[in-house]
Image (tube, rainbow, N blue to C red):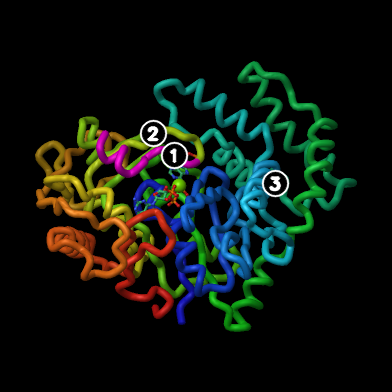
Amino acid sequence: MADVAVIGAQWGDEGKGKLVDWLSARAEVVVRFQGGHNAGHTLVIDGAVYKLSLLPSGIVRGGKMSVIGNGVVIDPWALVAEMDRLREQGVKISPANLVIAENACLILPLHGELDKLREEAAGKGRIGTTGRGIGPAYEDKAGRRAIKLIDLAYPETLPQKIERFLTHHNALRRGFGVPDIDKNALMKALNDIALAVLPFAGPVWKLLHEARRAGKRILFEGAQGVLLDVDHGTYPYVTSSNVVAGQAATGSGLGPRAVQYVLGIVKAYTTRVGEGPFPTELEDAVGQKLGERGHEFGTVTGRKRRCGWFDAALVRQSLRIAGVDGIALTKLDVLDTFDELKVCTGYEIEGQSYDYLPAGIDRQTHIKPVYETMEGWGDSTEGARSWADLPASAVKYVRRIEELIECPIALVSTSPERDDVILMRDPFEG
Ligand code: GDP
Ligand code: IMO
Ligand code: MG
């Protein structure tokens, strides 16, 4: 039996939340290992919509242990707000079913402010971040000045840590022409929020080792997607963490054998939110239609997602980089009413052909996709739960994708609803 990591294989929003929720029926522990509340994972259960940003998607299904690993950057105020929102929807959250790594780094209000100040100052050169302070918080982690969750438990030594932290930040703030942060005010805010979050803090690495030793099944929930990975993505238009499956080990403390099966989540077309290169983007009526049918608006910021054709070259590359064993193809139903569909099989730039997206923003921005055209199916796949329910042309599209990306399709998702899934191979079987 395999422990499974679910990761996004495009630019995020592939439907990771839905698949983690579906798989969590058969897992005992669900772990977030990177990112923060820049993520927006949507679950639809009998028509009720649950939106999760920091909490693992397993929290909605009762009886599961949810874990936020050390690789996640945590805004404690956003966490408390999210817990309140979910509790109002009837979700039970307590230290009995949620544990947060005590060594995780915190996102403080000044991180979000700095994120936005930088984006404004960059003007046209902006990244299009979620404005949640993710980048600045990871910078502080690498810069060894971050405030960690466990630091809140020691109010006597917290002032020294804050001092060091603010020496850096207040200098930056003066550069932006904004007022210094007052040490005492920050100290008070942290002491206040500590009461709400410290009960969840614990040694996650230990808990996970014990779970594994007891034979419990662990499911890792990635955020963002491979093309937003800080190393492998379309840099600098990326997020500030590693999102590939290897991060599941580092971001939770379980070692390189943490995962036996990597499930890549792949949308049947392509979307991206924020700035940056997007070879198959459609700025015409077809792109508009994809956005409307797919309800492509960001869960976190409400921004319109950019839409385009399926890019098999890009997905093939992502799957190899992340070591994906099988994929879940999502949102096939969104393509139901298209007469024809295009699939990108490679690229051309300055007379040279590529079967992958070469590194460097200069080439990535000017590269031209090479397409093959497939016929649409003009029939509904919405809610299909068996392969036999799919029209012949839809089967052909799915099989062609499988061939081009050189990776088996384990699952197909055909609506936002929890159980509208076609299972072809069970990821837990390895
Ligand atoms: P995540 O960030 O990868 O978890 O994805 P999001 O939740 O941000 O975005 C995916 C959106 O598509 C959500 O609104 C889901 O409810 C929805 N969705 C997921 N799978 C399907 C599907 O197979 N068909 C359709 N039509 N919508 C889906
Ligand atoms: P989920 O988990 C889609 C994008 C932002 C921006 C870039 C950097 O829901 O798939 P950041 O705030 O992280 O510094 O922004 O990354 N981005 C996402 N796009 N889905 C996400 O998460 C994203 N998280 C960040 O739009 O382009
Ligand atoms: Mg999302």
Q: Which mark is residue 304?
A: 2
Q: Tag 1: Cα neighbours inside 10 Å, few (<14), some, or many (≥20)? A: some
Left or right side of 100 for 361: left
Left or right side of 171 for 304: left
Q: Judge whether residue 427 is colored magenta.
A: no
Residue 377: image x %, image y %?
14, 54
Residue beneath label 1, please? 298
Query: In this picture, is 30 found above or below 270?
Result: below
Q: Tag 3: Cα neighbours inside 10 Å, few (<14), some, or many (≥20)? A: some
What's the residue type where badge 1 is placed?
Answer: Gly
Decide which of tag 1 and tag 2 comes sooner along the chain.
1
- Tell me the CA gap for discs 3 and 2: 27 Å
**Residue 242 can be seen, yes or no:** no
Q: Which mark is residue 80?
A: 3
Name the element at disc 2: loop
Report whether the residue tagged 1 is closer than 8 Å to ligand 2.
yes
Q: Are marks 1 and 2 in contact (CB under 8 Å)?
A: yes
Q: Which mark is residue 288?
A: none
What's the residue type where badge 3 is placed?
Answer: Val
Q: Residue furthest right?
A: 156
Residue 100: image x %, image y %?
68, 58
Q: Are marks 1 and 3 in contact (CB under 8 Å)?
A: no
Magenta span: 288-299
Identify the residue at horizontal 41%, vertical 48% (top origin): 13
What's the residue type where badge 2 is placed?
Answer: Lys
